[in-house]
Image (tube, rainbow, N blue to C red):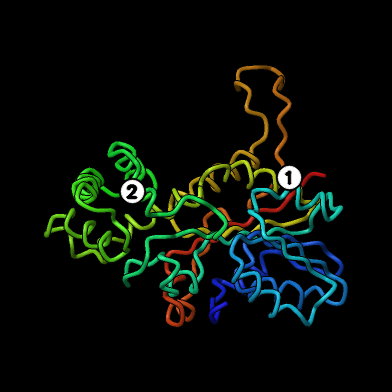
Amino acid sequence: MIGFSHKSVMLEECMQGLKLRPGGIYFDGTVGGGGHSYEILRRTAPDGRLIATDLDDDAIAAADKRLSEYSGRYRIYRSNFKDFESVLEEEGVDKLDGVLLDFGVSSFQLDERSRGFSYKCDAPLDMRMDSRASLTAADVVNEYPEDRLIQILRDYGEERFAKRIAEGIVRARKSHRIQRTGELAQIAEDGIPAKFKHNGPCARKTFQAIRIEVNGELTGLAEAVRGLTLRLRKGGRICILTFHSLEDRIVKTVFRDLATDCTCDKSLPVCICGKKKEIELVTRKPLSAGENELEQNSRAKSAKLRIAEKIRE
């Protein structure tokens, strides 16, 4: 492992949102470097319990080292949080007192060149959060048909110049396999008209889109958010940090559905759907990082925190 570093975004807001208590059982779906998890364990002493997951073995090693003083009160699984059912079954846990999901890419993953996540430095095109996975960014860039590339760039990157960038990728790969982040970043740059290049790095959306595809980040996300929310005991809280509008939209939609009572036609004299609201929204609108945090951690700029509380057993 190479010096894993990650600043926990909106740490205090998340801890307050979880309404932590000693003896509670908490689930951290993306342990990262262990910053949030450490505070959960510290603030639920002496007998709070933590179950955590992550796909990145470097993150798990770093978190395990950081949490070692609380040995016996936590367990980290190298697993996708979406597979929470099997993890909780392994732990013999039915209900949770709190759930934290942080969908951000860690500082280590962005800064460590060999991971190929960043458009700011030249590296092998990889982008796998789980090194055991077979699909890499190079596979997507070199093997996906043009129409699929356009769809990914539009849907996952919200890139208005998706067609131009995809055409550039296909044109370049006819002569050689695109293997480096630097070349992909340049293709993305070349695909955007000059008059639209004043709004920050031109490759950001392209890299986001391909990273989401490689890691299947949106696949099954709504089902996982819903399932984990329903695993809360009455009074339990779920806090979710998102970093782009696609994730936030999914979380917002799931929360809104779970916070809605009867959906029958209002003209009916009685409810026939039987739907009961499961949660109360603690945050009607998502929270954002404060000015002090933004000054110290620029990666908190796009963060949005949504919190909900379970109101039914």
Q: Quadrant of residue 170?
A: top left
- Amino acid type of the residue that numbered disc 2 sits on in the rendered structure: Glu
Q: Nearer the viewer, residue 51 or 149?
A: 149
> Residue 158 got which mark?
2
Q: In which quarter of the image is the N terminus?
A: bottom right
Q: Which of marks 1 and 2 is in front?
A: 2
Relative side of 28 to 10, left or right:
right
Residue type at numbered disc 1 = Leu
Distance from label 1 to label 2 (Cα)?
31 Å
**Compared to 147, does 159 lie above or below?**
below
**Residue at the spot x=12%, y=59% of the render?**
195
Q: Which of 264 and 195 is in front in this view?
A: 195
Quarter-of-image position of residue 208:
bottom left
The residue lying toward the viewer, choosing from 20 and 96, is 96
Could you say where residue 68 lies in the image, as x and y percent from the top left?
Answer: 76, 80
| Quarter the C terminus occupies | top right
Q: Residue, x 41% and y 73% (percent of image)?
A: 113
Q: Quadrant of residue 101?
A: bottom right
Secondary structure beneath label 2: loop
Q: How crowded is mark 2: few (under 14 residues within 10 Å), some or many (20 or more)?
A: some
> Is 14 or 124 nearer to us in this picture?
124
Q: Which of marks 1 and 2 is nearer the N terminus?
A: 2
Q: Which residue lies furthest to the top in this view?
A: 268
Image point 71% across, 19% down: which residue?
Answer: 272
Tell me the element at label 1.
helix
Number of the label disc, if any, that sits on residue 230: 1
Residue sticking out furthest to the front: 176
